[in-house]
Structures are given as C-alpha cells and as structure tokens.
Image: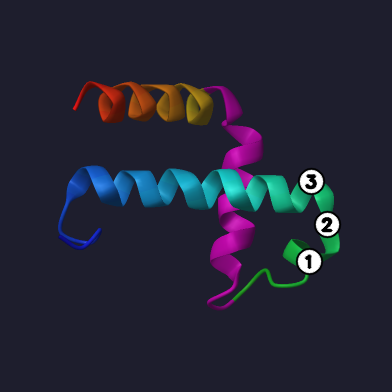
Amino acid sequence: MSALFNFQSLLLVILLLICTSTYVRALFPSLIDRNKTGFLGIFFMSARIGERLSPYVSLACMAMACTILMQ
C-alpha cells in the first residue's frame, strides 16, 4: 500500500522529512536556506519545524517507533 493512503506511513514519511531536513540544515545551512520558496521550500519549512518543535518531534518519533515495533 502506498504511503499516501496509509495514515501511519504518511506520518512516518512526514517525520522522516522533518528530521532529515533539520539534520541537513545543521550540517549545511546554505543548502537549505537558499530555497525558501517554491517546491524546495518544503525542506526549509520542515527544518524550521524540526528546530522550533524539536521536543515534540522527538516524542512523535519515539511514539512512531513504539507503534512500529508493537506491530
């Protein structure tokens, strides 16, 4: 089943996008910061969400890991 039709898989993809964008921005800030608008602006916005809401994102990652392990 595609990640678009399965809600748990969609949440997993979104969490991975946020975590990856935040990590890449920490290593190479100019790579993410130059594309603030358009399609590639999704990565900039994801990095901002990961930076500002990091405790909640980490809790969501742990909760997702527990649900995947329990299946």
Left or right of 26 on screen, residue 46:
left
Report how far apart the C-alphas of labels 1 and 2 lie in the structure.
6 Å
Left or right of 34 on screen, residue 5:
left
Please state the extent of the stretch shown in magenta in the rendering: 38-55
The residue identified by callout 3 is 26
Instruction: Please give the label number shown on residue 28.
Output: 2
Q: Position of residue 6 (x, y in %)?
A: 17, 52
Callout 1 amino acid: Leu
Q: Residue furthest bottom?
A: 38
The N terminus is located in which quarter? bottom left
Q: Is residue 29 above or below residue 64?
A: below
Callout 3 amino acid: Ala
Instruction: Name the residue rendered at 29%, 25% in the picture.
Output: 69
Task: Give the mark nearer the N terminus: 3 vs 1.
Answer: 3
Q: Position of residue 71 (x, y in %)?
A: 18, 28
Pointer 2 local density, CA inside 10 Å: few below 14, some 14–19, many at least 20: few
Quadrant location of residue 43? bottom right
Quadrant location of residue 66? top left
The residue identified by callout 1 is 31
In this rendering, the count of numbered labels is 3
Instruction: Name the residue rendered at 59%, 73% in the picture.
Output: 40
